[in-house]
């Protein structure tokens, strides 16, 4: 019968029970070293850790291969803490793993969660944002977009591109009206034979007339 190295070292199936995580997730963590090599061992019948698969350069005693596969043993507590601290918080799948690991960790280390609370995201570092914070930011952005779309439909908000187009049209019409004044009043100015007062009146009346014509331009450009 194979015995545990110590009470902290458990089999994969026991680690599943402790954490609520399935075998596939745990084996994936082992392969990706989310559970570090020093928290993993495989034992023989004499309860000696077999670590040659971790340290290939260390000479080992050659033994006859056995027909049965030696089970993995995991040093459960440090393995869980290491895994928890090295999860990628930007991945949705990590969120569920982290919650399950946290529930297990507090059973043997109640202060761990107090020391490992999520810090407020650093606005200068986009990689520091947690998954929960990313979801919150996304929801806020969607709510703002929905609010802007509602205001647009109500007519209290106009797209910037539309405003720019209407301002351009407004400016073009004013420009054309003012540039037409000299051609229209030059003959009249010549006719007053240098009379300063009459010349000023002619220019003033011509400008005033054009501005009067443009008084309703706002209504016309908004249609």
Image (cartoon, grey):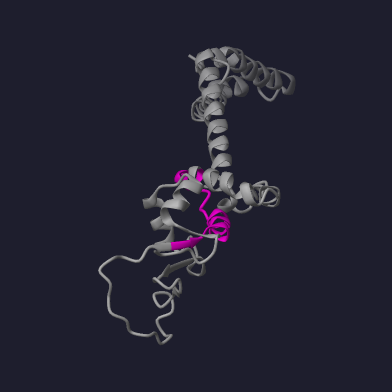
Residue farthest to the bottom?
59
Residue farthest to the front?
1
Residue sitting at x 70%, y 52%:
115
Quarter occupied by the N terminus: bottom left
Q: Does the magenta stretch include residue 79?
A: yes
Asked if residue 66 lies left or right of residue 166, the reply is left
Asked if residue 123 lies left or right of residue 222, the reply is right
The boundaries of the magenta stretch are 73-95
Residue farthest to the left?
67
Residue sitting at x 70%, y 17%:
201
Is residue 183 visible in the rendered image? The answer is no
User: Magenta-highlighted stretch: main secondary structure?
Assistant: helix
Total numbered circles = 0
Q: Which of 46 and 122 is in front in this view?
A: 46
Q: In the displayed structure, would residue 162 be above or below residue 43?
A: above
- What x and y, as percent, mark residue 77? 57, 57
- What x and y, as percent, mark residue 195? 71, 22
Q: Nearer the viewer, residue 197 or 110?
A: 110
Residue sitting at x 63%, y 47%:
106
- What x and y, as percent, mark residue 37? 48, 69
Q: Is residue 49 magenta?
A: no
Q: In the displayed structure, would residue 88 be above or below residue 146?
A: below
Q: Nearer the viewer, residue 108 or 3?
A: 3
Q: In the displayed structure, would residue 218 be above or below residue 82?
A: above
Q: Which of 47 and 172 is in front in this view?
A: 47
Is residue 153 visible in the rendered image? The answer is yes
Residue sitting at x 45%, y 47%:
21
């Amino acid at each position: 019968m194979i015995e545990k190295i110590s009470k902290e070292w458990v089999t994969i199936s026991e680690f599943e029970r402790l954490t609520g995580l399935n075998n596939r997730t745990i084996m994936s963590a082992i392969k990706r070293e989310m559970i570090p090599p020093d928290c993993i061992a495989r034992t023989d019948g004499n309860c000696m850790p077999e670590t040659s698969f971790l340290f290939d350069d260390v000479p080992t005693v050659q033994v006859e291969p056995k027909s049965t596969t030696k089970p993995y043993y995991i040093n459960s507590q440090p393995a869980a803490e290491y895994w928890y601290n090295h999860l990628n918080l930007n991945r949705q799948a990590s969120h569920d793993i982290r919650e399950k690991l946290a529930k297990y960790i507090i059973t043997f280390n109640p202060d761990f969660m107090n020391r490992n609370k999520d810090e407020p995201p650093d606005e200068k570092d986009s990689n520091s944002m947690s998954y929960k914070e990313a979801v919150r930011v996304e929801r806020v952005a969607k709510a703002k977009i929905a609010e802007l779309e509602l205001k647009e439909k109500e007519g209290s908000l106009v797209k910037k591109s539309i405003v720019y187009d209407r301002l351009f049209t407004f400016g073009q019409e004013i420009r054309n009206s003012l540039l037409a004044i000299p051609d229209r009043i030059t003959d009249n100015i010549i006719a007053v034979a240098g009379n300063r007062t009459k010349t000023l009146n002619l220019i003033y009346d011509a400008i005033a007339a054009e501005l009067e014509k443009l008084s309703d331009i706002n209504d016309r450009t908004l249609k």
